[in-house]
Image (spheres, rainbow, N blue to C red):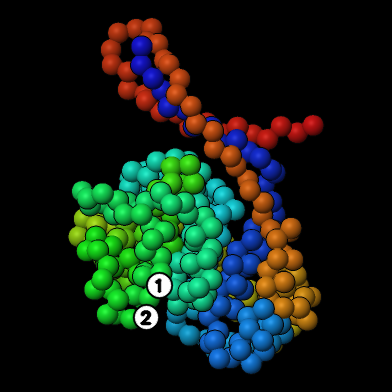
Amino acid sequence: MSTLSVRSEVQRNAVASEVAALVAVVRPILEGLLYSLKADVTHEVGGVAGVKLKMLPRLYRPGDGDCGICFEYAVHDAVMRKDADVLQRIEDSLKQCRVPGSAYQSILFGAEKKGASQLIATAKEILTDDSRLLTGKQSQPPKLKGYLNALAAAFRRPTTRLSLPTSINGLWKADLFLGTADGDRYVGTTVKINQAQLEAANGLRVGIVPASQGVSDRIRKDERKNLIICPLPYDQSFMEIFFSAWGIVQQVIFADAQLPKDVALPIPSHRQVAREIVSRREFPVLDVVEALKPIAQPELLDTEQSIETQTSIGSGTVLLDGLISPVPRKVG
């Protein structure tokens, strides 16, 4: 008698509209643009909390790295709200890193975005004293919480990097820490909108990138960079939604936080998302992000895993060792 791993994807909510899916990704994009503003600029209006949506087009200066920053925020947000398309890929990637547990979570740690003190405070709320970082090395996994201050300092001061253990002296390049609350283990993760920008560094284990045209989107290990490469798919999936949401936000900014012309946003669902944004132009960006939450795509699936026994009724080798089953939502 052998065992069979059964994973049921249980639908919690009805599939939301395209508008709800777009709003879900617009939220972290707005937040990413807000935190990309220069500190001296936001200081003039009382800090990021005082930046109203109508002020964003006047304070924001487009840069080459803006889309990448917003991509990092969007991936982090997708993990935290359990976006099925993204979480499936993250789960498979973390298994290759031997991360135990199933309560997946993300800790945003791009030191150049939010203030370092805010990032550290948030990370310390999530991490326990025994939260450890899996580096892929044979040595004892280091406790992550104790290195947060040093990692944030190493981003700005190269001399600080010399004091970090060799196994994690490149971890200051991490954008996220991905792991599980129940397993209490994490991996340093780099997120790049351009796969060519992925680089190896001690302490980094996962690289999240958009899938490339004409190239397999399977999760794989890059032996040269010692990274588990996690491509996020396009067609009717996360990357398509991300770039559509990015385009909507950029058109709204170009229109000075007013509704763009039809030629700028010819798709009705995109125009509806823009209306949801610009109707709140008099409010602070952070309040707008929070206000959009109820109309965003909710958590869609819960994953339930179990080990079942299977009995062979004939001769030969049992080849099936796992089963994935969708379970639709019950109505009524």
Q: Can residue 213 be seen in this view?
A: no
Residue visible at 41% across and 65% down in the picture: 148
Residue visible at 59% across and 53% down in the picture: 81
Q: What element carries label 1?
A: helix
Dots 1, 2 in contact, CB < 8 A: yes
Amino acid tagged 2: Arg
Q: Quadrant of residue 194?
A: bottom left
Quick one: 47 or 235, which is closer to the camera? Answer: 47
Left or right of 229? Residue 253 is right
Residue visible at 67% across and 63% down in the picture: 23
**Which residue has dot 1 on it?**
152
Left or right of 205? Residue 84 is right
Left or right of 290? Residue 59 is left
Q: Can residue 204 be seen in this view?
A: yes
Q: Residue 264 carries which label?
A: none
**Which residue has dot 2 on it?**
156
Residues at marks 1 and 2, CA–CA distance in whole angstroms: 7 Å
